[in-house]
Each structure stands twice: as structure tokens, then as C-alpha cells.
Amino acid sequence: MMLNKAVAYGYRNAGFILDRGYFSRENIRYMDKCGYDFLIMVKGMKSLCNDAIRQVQGTFEDKSQCSIRRYQVSGTTLKMPRGRRKVTTTSLDDKIEQQKKGLEKAKVKYEKEKETMAQLVKLRNKMRKEELMIRTLSFLSGKIGGS
């Protein structure tokens, strides 16, 4: 993992921007244990993010150090208190389990649809063969074009 390299190189004040593919209990705990800051996509965590945003809403938007003038937006860093991490981890675990269940359902649906598609392709190919045989017989018997 990249964190092992960062630790080996002795980086102390580094932060990471991570794709949501790194979103797992083990990865979050490991980064926390190593003491690194990180940004990570938390798709499916809307209520957690909304609560954190509502806590700071209205406190930073007019501060010049929070302004990115080029894009006409303001931003700030949200930090969850250390005491809430256990609660957050539990809710993250629940969300991860829900996503796993959803993925399993999607896999089952995909397999059923894959089987149905295979049957349709076989039926289409059979119909094409039958149509080709009918045209061939019509041609051979001199009945092409309704004559």
C-alpha cells in the first residue's frame, strides 16, 4: 500500500486524496493509525456529511482565506472529533455491509439477465437459419419475388 511507502520514506506531514475504492474500514483505520490526513469519496454517507457541513455552514463563507476567487467558491476543512470516530466507523461498517448486499443482488440480477440474453441470441440465430433455409428453398424452386 502507498502508506507503507510514505512511512518508509519518513513522510510525516503528508496528506492523501483517495478514490472511493480505498473506502474500507481497514484502510481508514490504517491511515488513522499512521497519523495521516486524507480526503476520501464517501458516496452513500450523505447524512454523515450533511451533519458535518451543517455544523460549519455560515462560519467560513465570507472569510477571504476560505475563498477560491478563480472559481467563485469558498471551502473549509471538516474534522470530526476523535470521540465520534467509533460511532462513525460503526455507521461506515453498516453502510459497507449494505453496499455489499446491494452488490450481491446486482450480481444475481446480472447472471439472470445474462442467461436470458444468451437464450435470446440462440433463438435469433435459429430464426436466421430458418429464414435462410426458406429463402434458399424458394430460390431453388424458382419462387423468388412472388412468381
Image (cartoon, helix red, strand yellow):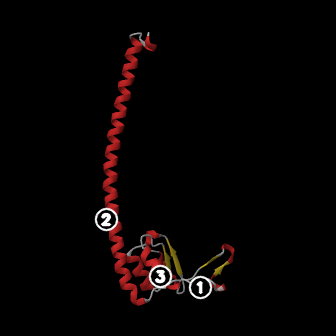
Q: Is 7 rendered above or below residue 120?
A: below
Residue 131 position by quadrant = top left
Q: Secondary structure at mark 1?
A: loop
Q: CA distance from mark 2 to mark 1?
A: 39 Å
Tell me the residue that label 1 is attached to.
Answer: 60
Mark seen at residue 101: 2
Q: Is residue 125 left or right of residue 75?
A: left
Which label's residue is closer to the chain start, 2 or 3? 3
The residue mark sitting in front, 2 or 3, is 3
Residue positioned 44% across, 68% down in the render? 21
Tell me the residue that label 3 is attached to.
Answer: 52
Q: Label 1 is placed on what type of residue?
A: Phe
Q: Residue furthest front?
A: 58
Q: CA distance from mark 3 to mark 1?
A: 14 Å
Q: Secondary structure at mark 2?
A: helix
Q: Quadrant of the N terminus?
A: bottom left
Q: Is 126 rendered above or below residue 25?
A: above
Residue positioned 40% across, 12% down in the render? 140
Residue positioned 40% across, 19% down in the render? 135
Q: Quadrant of the C terminus?
A: top left
Which label's residue is closer to the chain start, 2 or 1? 1
The residue mark sitting in front, 2 or 1, is 1
Mark seen at residue 36: none
Is residue 43 something that shows in the picture? yes
Q: Is residue 115 left or right of residue 74?
A: left
Residue 43: give x, y in percent of width and height.
44, 70
Q: Is 107 rendered above or below residue 62?
A: above
Q: Secondary structure at mark 3?
A: helix
Residue 143: give x, y in percent of width and height.
41, 11
